[in-house]
Image: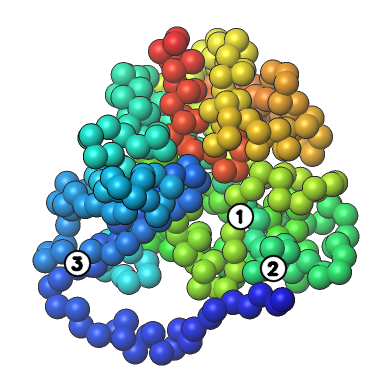
Amino acid sequence: MSITSAATDKNVLARYSDLDQGKRVMCEYIWIDGTGEGIRSKCRTLDQEPKCAGDCPIWNYDGSSTYQAEGSNSDMYLYPVAIFRDPFRRDPNKLVLCDVYKYNKQPAETNKRAACKKVMDMAADSHPWFGIEQEYTILDHDGHPFGWPKNGFPGPQGPYYCGVGANKVYGRDIIEAHYRACLYSGVKISGCNAEVMPAQWEFQVGPCEGIEMGDHLWVGRYLLHRVAEEFGVIVTLDPKPIEGDWNGAGAHCNYSTVQMRNQGGIKAIEDAIEKLSKHHVRHIKAYDPKEGKDNERRLTGFHETSSIHDFSAGVANRGASIRIPRNVAEDGCGYLEDRRPSSNCDPYSVTEVIVKTTVLNE
């Protein structure tokens, strides 16, 4: 059975998108579902343009349809926490990122933001900065990597990373559209590039301080899925989408505190690495939604990864758990890169455990 994209004519939609909507505003509420990876959304009309998340009312939805509740007690609640411009409907319409709470006002099991926010508030004096490199793979509707031969494989890895040319990169239009959507929305996107495996790409978000990292990366992911939807392709965050001699996908986390960024900060970086070395197992469990089982397919010690079983660190070493960039070692201050988080990680969990270990000493 062949699988085809249920595509529609965007030129027809454009006739309606240009209609005057009056003073009312469309607000797309966005949240994380019960898988800890899936993004859901639905739209609500507000009578006036919200200026902050607090201007948006608490809403609810059917949690039995998102793997978060039983049908007999299915109401889940959306608490707006961050607001962005909507690049699809344009101004004054908004994207509203939400926390999910249960009927008893407790955070849903996949609401990692609530715990992360508490940790970030406790560590505020250290001004933790993060930048996450989100790798992903573009697929056709049949699950095959976009642009790959249907009955075989492209040539071996080598020419694709940061490549140029139709025989080296696949899907650049999607990446360009996503970049502009992020800039318009206010997501702190800082770059993008083609990755080592063909049809694999990366966008970077940051620097962001504290809880902002998770907020901006989740909205960046939402925008990526929406843009891909319009192009009729699928984005996967699977850490090892193709078995064999192909690179996996990660979400390398660049991290620093004010002490690390100041002159002589290399000492604070080395101290943080020492603390991280003592909590390797805890971090591995926090770095993918399946507590290490997804990352196990990726962190093999090959394809620019460290082994999931061992902790390591080194200057300019992309085969280590923690990389100190060469310029940081030379400058004596800056940041470290944790290369262990998987591409499908929850950035709230990643940033929370890093700060817990290195700042709060928990």
Depth check, front residue: 207 or 261: 207
Q: Residues within 10 Å of mark 3 (few under 14, many from 20)?
A: few
Task: Point out the frontmost of discs 1 and 2.
Answer: 2
**Would residue 100 be found to the left or right of residue 179 on screen?**
left
Q: Is residue 138 left or right of residue 118?
A: right
Residue 304: x, y in percent? 76, 36
- Quarter of the rendering occupied by the N terminus: bottom right
Q: Are marks 1 and 2 in contact (CB under 8 Å)?
A: no
Residue marked by disc 2: 142
Q: Secondary structure at mark 2?
A: loop
The one of 262 and 258 positioned closer to us in this rendering: 258
Q: Secondary structure at mark 1?
A: strand
- Where is residue 79, by image quadrant? top left
Q: Give percent across and percent down for residue 141.
A: 64, 69
Q: Position of residue 86 (x, y in %)?
A: 33, 64
Q: Earlier in the sequence, mark 3 or mark 1?
A: 3
State the mark number for residue 45. Answer: 3
Q: Residue furthest front?
A: 72
In contact (CB < 8 Å): disc 2 and disc 3 = no
- On the question of residue 261 being in view, the answer is no
Residue position marked by numbered label 1 in the rendering: 236
